[in-house]
Amino acid sequence: MKIDWLPLVEMIRSHDRFLLTSHQRADCDAIGSEMALALILETIGKQVAVVNADEVPEHIAFMDPYGRVGVLGATAPLEALRGFDAMIVVDTSAWSQLGGMADVLRGFRGAKAVIDHHASEDDLGAAVFKDNTAEATGRLILQLAKELGVPITPEIAAPLFAAIATDTGWFRFPSVTADTFAALAKLTAAGASPAKTFAELFEQHSLPRLHLRGRILERVKPECHGRMMWTEVSAIDFRETNAQKTDTEDVINMLLTVKGVEVALLFVELEPTVTKVSLRSRSAFDVNQLANQFGGGGHKAAAGITFAGPMIEAQQAVLEAVRLGMGECESK
Ligand code: 5GP
Ligand code: MN
Ligand code: MN
C-alpha cells in the first residue's frame, strides 16, 4: 500500500504551529514517531509541541531524554493547547486510545491529520495517511521525512529505529519485509545503533517486572487442544511484586512460543471494573475482528480490548467468543 503524501506535505507547508499526539499507554512506536516527527517539523522551521493523555511509561523513558512529551492536564494544561493551527495524531486511529486527548482533537479548529498503520479505524475527523501493511508508524514518518526533503539526523534515526524494532518484536513478526530492512539500513547509516537500542529496550528491566512475568507465565492455561493459551494478572500481583502496569508488555508473545498454539490472550486487571485484554494470533484467526466485537481493535495478528467490567466477566465473554471463533473447540 502506498500513501499519497502530497496533501499532508501541503498541509505541513501551509501551517506553522503543530500539536502532536498519540495513544495512551504509549509504546516506542508512539513516542518514537512523535519525537522524530517533532524534529522533522522543526527542521523546516515549524513550532511543535507533543502532548499525550498520560506520561511516557517509565521503561521507555529513554525515548524522551529531554522530557518533551507534555501530559495533558499536568505539564500541559488545557490553556497551553491554544494557538496551534494544526494537529497530527500518530500510531492510532481510535477515539478510545486517545484518552483525554480525544476531547482536545474533537474541539480542535485547525487542520488535522492522522498517520497510522492500524487496521481498525474510527473517523477522527482528520485527513488520514494510513498504510495497514506498514510494520510501524515509524516507517511512515521516515517516508514523510523524505517527502519533505528533511535529512535524517542521528536524533531522528534513533527513535524511528526503536519504533520499528518494537512494533516488529525485534524484526520477527510477519509484518517484516525487505522494506523494513531497507528502512533500518537507512536509519543505521544515519546514526541509529541497533546494539544500543537493544540494550535500552531489553536489558534495562526491573526485578519486579521479571517477578511479574514469572507469575503470568506460571498460570498459562491451554484450551482447544493447545491451540489457544490464556493467562491473567491481577491487581494483587502488581501490588505483591511491586511491578508497574506497563510491565506486562511483551510477555504475551511468550505464549506463542509454545508448539501448536495459534491464539494467545492475556487478561490484565487494571481496575476492579476495567480489564485490559491483549490478543495475539499466529494463524488465520483474526484477533482484530474478535476485538472489534468488544469495542477494541488493532491488527489481524495483534489486538487489544479495554473491557469495561471485572476480569472474570472479561474472561467469560472474550474466551467464549474465541472458542466459538476457533471451531473444534470445547465450550466450557
Ligand atoms: P497490546 O495488546 O500490545 O496492548 O496491543 C496490541 C494492539 O492492539 C496494538 O496495535 C494496539 O494499538 C491495539 N489495542 C490495544 N488495546 C486496544 C484498545 O483498547 N482499543 C483499540 N482500538 N486498540 C487496542
Ligand atoms: Mn503503538
Ligand atoms: Mn504502531
Image (tube, rainbow, N blue to C red):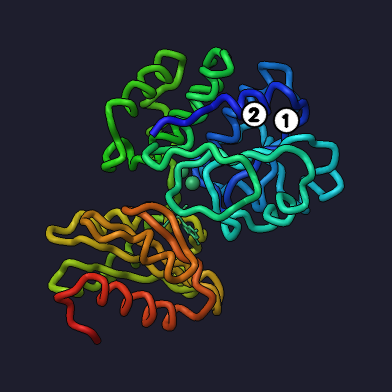
* Residue displayed at 54% across by 50% down: 93
The reply to whether residue 215 is visible in this rendering is yes
Tag of residue 103 = none
Contact? badges 1 and 2 (CB < 8 Å): yes
Vertical relation: 71 (above or below) 10: below
Amino acid residing under circle 1? Val
Indicate which disc residue 48 carries: 1
The correct choice, above or below, for 126 with respect to 97 in the image is above
Other residues around mark 2 within 10 Å, as few (<14) / some (14–19) / many (≥20) = many
Q: Is residue 167 left or right of residue 23?
A: left
Where is residue 70 shown, x and y percent of the image? 71, 43
Q: Residue furthest bottom?
A: 332
Q: Which mark is residue 38?
A: 2
Structural crowding at the residue carrying mark 1, measured as other residues with C-alpha within 10 Å and reported as few (<14), some (14–19) or many (≥20): many
Mark 2 element type: helix
Quadrant in which residue 273 is drawn: bottom right
Disc 2 residue: CB within 8 Å of ligand 2 = no
> Residue 25 location, x and y as percent?
55, 53
Please identify the quarter of the rendering in which residue 318 is found: bottom left
